[in-house]
């Protein structure tokens, strides 16, 4: 199972970046491809919601053993 994560960074001023993590609340996902699709959705939603120029994104599909 995979959990989708983003690290979103925006240029706060000319010398520093302001970053914060975002964890997906829909998952976890059964495979990495589903997780990557969700990350694409999350990035698109954030870009459409917040008008911040100079955003940078780092993404991660974190593997987690989940007992059933």
Image (spheres, rainbow, N blue to C red):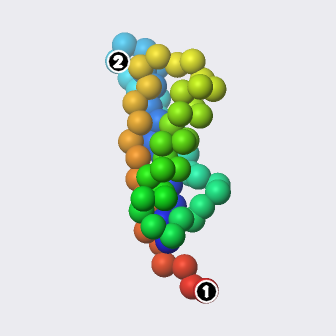
**Is residue 60 left or right of 48 when viewed as pictured?**
left
Question: Image height check: is 60 above or below 62?
Answer: above
Please provide percent x and percent y for residue 46: 57, 32
Residue 42, visible in the rendered structure: yes
The residue identified by callout 1 is 68
Residue at the image point whose x is 64% and y is 57% from the top: 26
Within-10-Å neighbours for mark 2: few <14, some 14–19, many 20+: few
Please provide percent x and percent y for residue 28: 57, 65
Q: Residue furthest top?
A: 14
Residue at the image point whose x is 61% and y is 86% from the top: 68
Q: Which mark is residue 15?
A: 2
Residue at the image point whose x is 45% and y is 67% from the top: 31
Question: Image height check: is 57 above or below 27?
Answer: above
Residue 5, visible in the rendered structure: no
Q: Residue furthest left?
A: 15
Question: Between disc 1 and disc 2, whose residue precedes?
Answer: 2
> Are discs 1 and 2 less than 8 Å apart at CB?
no
- Mark 2 secondary-structure assignment: loop
Query: Which is nearer the eye, 44 or 11?
Result: 44
**Where, by quadrant of the figure, is residue 66 drawn?**
bottom right
Query: Which is nearer the eye, 2 or 13?
Result: 2
């Amino acid at each position: 199972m995979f959990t989708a994560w983003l690290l979103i960074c925006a240029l706060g001023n000319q010398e520093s970046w302001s970053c914060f993590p975002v964890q997906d609340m829909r998952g976890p996902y059964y495979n990495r491809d589903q997780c990557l699709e969700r990350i694409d959705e999350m990035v698109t939603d954030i870009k459409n919601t917040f008008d911040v120029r100079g955003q940078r994104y780092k993404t991660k599909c974190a593997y987690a053993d989940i007992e059933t």
